[in-house]
Amino acid sequence: MAKPELARLKHAFLSSPEEIIDEARNGRMFILVDDEDRENEGDLIIPAQMATPDAINFMAKFGRGLICLAMTKDRVETLGLELMSRANGTRHETAFTVSIEAREGVTTGISAADRARTISVAIDASKGKTDIVTPGHVFPLVARDGGVLVRAGHTEAAVDVARLAGLNPAGVICEIMNEDGTMARMDDLVSFAQFHNLKIGTIRDLIAYRRRHDHLVERRAESRFTSQWGGDWTAIAFWNKATETDQMVLLKGKIDPSKPTLVRMHAVSPLSDIFGEAGGRTGLLERSMQIIGEEGSGVIVAINKRRNDAFSVALEMRNGVREPDMEELRDYGVGAMILSELGVHDMILLTNTHHTLVGLDGYGLSIVGERAIDPET
């Protein structure tokens, strides 16, 4: 669907985040639509503590997609659930764990009542890993810390809405499919919502709502310095409250909100960036600084690993002992928050690889172009 058409439908049919949160608080199911550039699909969502057998049956009968349980990382760890795959090859890095079943109170496990029972046990703070068995008929998903401000997915949105509604931070989600087996798109979802009297919201609007109410990044310190790459810079340290890590930003010149800003989102690699390992990534940071220096203004966001064992993990991955996992991906959500704090709106990405970044509208950001760091790449 073209963007003007999506905008028209938004004004006519979409509900505000406040309305969606109110639906959740009152135990009513709703639909959330993700970014056009991502799946452009809608999921049925209900807070997990409101997931009755009737709600599960509705999802199975009318949603037709996979019924999943979105939970926080802490809860998943409490239940002792392992990721389904350490090497997540899915397009959007959806974090499935092994499937689960309640140890007691179920029969075959697949009925609506059995799945509702499993969900109830899984989110009950008084229950633990001994109350759950694997495999089963409920599919848990791990929400990223920081929610939609970090990853613009239905998993994080379901947990965020439940938390904002004052409920257990967990949600049950199910993709909506048409009767012919195709995925329901925006026009299909509007008809579906009208027929079933459901409200529709967007993850983009939820991101914007959280930005107005939650501040996950904090500007802590800054210092000017002169580099052999690009001349004078201002180094700024931002504190990431979700992961309790520092993020370093290099600012060149002043940001002009009326013009596109050159931006490099750089995942820090000790071997390449510090020790000069021969390979494709070595020199990317220096070349980015030189390009921005020639331009006279721009931003480099140095994305820090969110783990204390980043060095050993990097070496294990290099030696083939360990597969890459979600924790090693660049955290564009945090980068987007930082860029928004700096006053960036339109941006030109410095990259040798095309990226489709989701949910940027919620941060007031837009990618208007990409520029190769190495023209020969």
Image: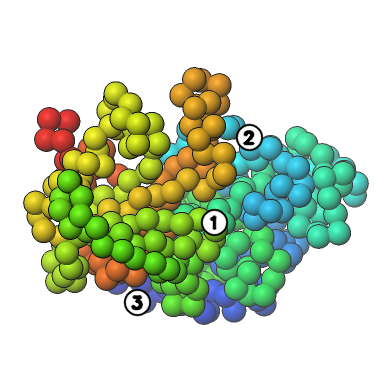
Q: Nearer the viewer, mark 1 or mark 3?
A: 1
Q: Which residue is mark 3?
A: 11
Q: CA distance from mark 1 to mark 2?
A: 23 Å
- Quadrant (top left, top right, bottom left, bottom right) of the C terminus: top left
| Residue shown at the point (32%, 54%) measured from the top left | 301
Circle on res. 344 = none
Q: Is 11 above or below relative to 350? A: below
The amino acid pointed to by label 3 is His
The amino acid pointed to by label 1 is Thr
Q: CA distance from mark 2 to mark 3?
A: 40 Å
**Coordinates of residue 198 in the picture (x, y in percent):** 55, 70
Q: Residues within 10 Å of mark 2 (few under 14, many from 20)?
A: some
Q: Nearer the viewer, mark 2 or mark 3?
A: 2
Q: Indicate the colouring scheme.
A: rainbow
Q: Is 171 above or below relative to 350? A: below
The amino acid pointed to by label 2 is Met
Considering only order in the chain, which callout, 3 or 2, is on the residue closer to the N terminus? 3
- Quadrant (top left, top right, bottom left, bottom right) of the N terminus: bottom left
Circle on res. 84 = 2
